[in-house]
Image: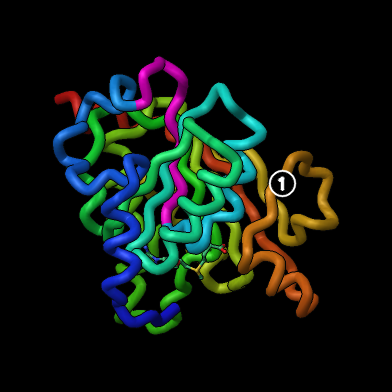
Amino acid sequence: MRLRKKGWAKLELEKEPKVIFSSLDHKGQWKELFGNSDPIHLELGCGRGRFINQLAFTNTNINYIALDVYDELLVHVLRRANENQLNNIRVIPINIKNIGDLFEQDEIEKIYINFCTPWPKKKHHKRRLTHPNFLRLYQTFLKEDAEIWFKTDDDLLFTDSLEYFKEAGFKELYRTYDLHQSDFQGNSITEYEEKFSSQSIKIKFVRVRNSSNRARYHV
Ligand SMILES: C[S@@+](CC[C@H](N)C(=O)[O-])C[C@H]1O[C@@H](n2cnc3c(N)ncnc32)[C@H](O)[C@@H]1O
């Protein structure tokens, strides 16, 4: 998704207490920032935020952080959160490649990655948000039994990602190649998901659990 940086969006975000610019300051202190000890879930590359707002509305006992690189998209996440008076959602404008500095080990219990850029050329695979380099970064702040839920329209990205998860030591819990026809309950539809499924493209989905890498970071 290509968007030109627009100053108006940054100005709107700057007025908003739900937007965290100085995110480094909160490492290890996100519970204090939310004012409770509820679990914290992330969505990486949230776009306009239909998905995360729906979850935050339904699950008031979970705190959600929406991350995207584009201010122009995050503005919509916030407008929706404010319309619904949601207090369990925060927004961070950031490139995910810098996510490693934001959270302390064990601070995050779940990550959602929905329709991330597939980067089909081999020389660009390292930019995929499911690439093992990213997964190892996420493992520096995930709880040991934390989950990643990953959805995509892209067959090749999906096949490769299944291998990436395995390589990084995640245990697969559920997989479907056609989410909307599967027995999976409680799916929340994203903007891109709606677009792809209206074109009859099947949605691929996998849930994995962070299982075996703890030792690596504690030796
Ligand atoms: C194809 S859109 C999907 C948006 C939304 N998740 C959905 O399913 O409707 C991918 C999103 O990821 C964001 N994105 C891609 N790479 C990113 C990165 N490295 N850091 C932060 N956001 C990124 C884009 O700005 C865009 O909003």
Q: Which residue is mark 1?
A: 187
Relative depth, front residue between 143 and 114:
114
Residue 169 visible at all: no
Q: Secondary structure at mark 1?
A: loop
Q: Which residues are magenta?
A: 34-44
User: Which image quarter: residue 119?
Assistant: bottom left
Instruction: Decide which of 12, 214 is in the foreground and name it.
Output: 12
Which quadrant does ligand 1 occupy? bottom left
Quarter of the image with the N terminus is bottom left
Apparent side of residue 68 relative to residue 102 in the rendered image (left or right): right
Question: Residue at position x 37%, y 59% from top?
Answer: 68
Q: Position of residue 77 (x, y in %)?
A: 49, 54
Above or below residue 105? Residue 137 is below
Q: Residue at x 58, y 46 (%)?
A: 83
* Quadrant of image for the C terminus: top left
Which image quarter: residue 84? top right
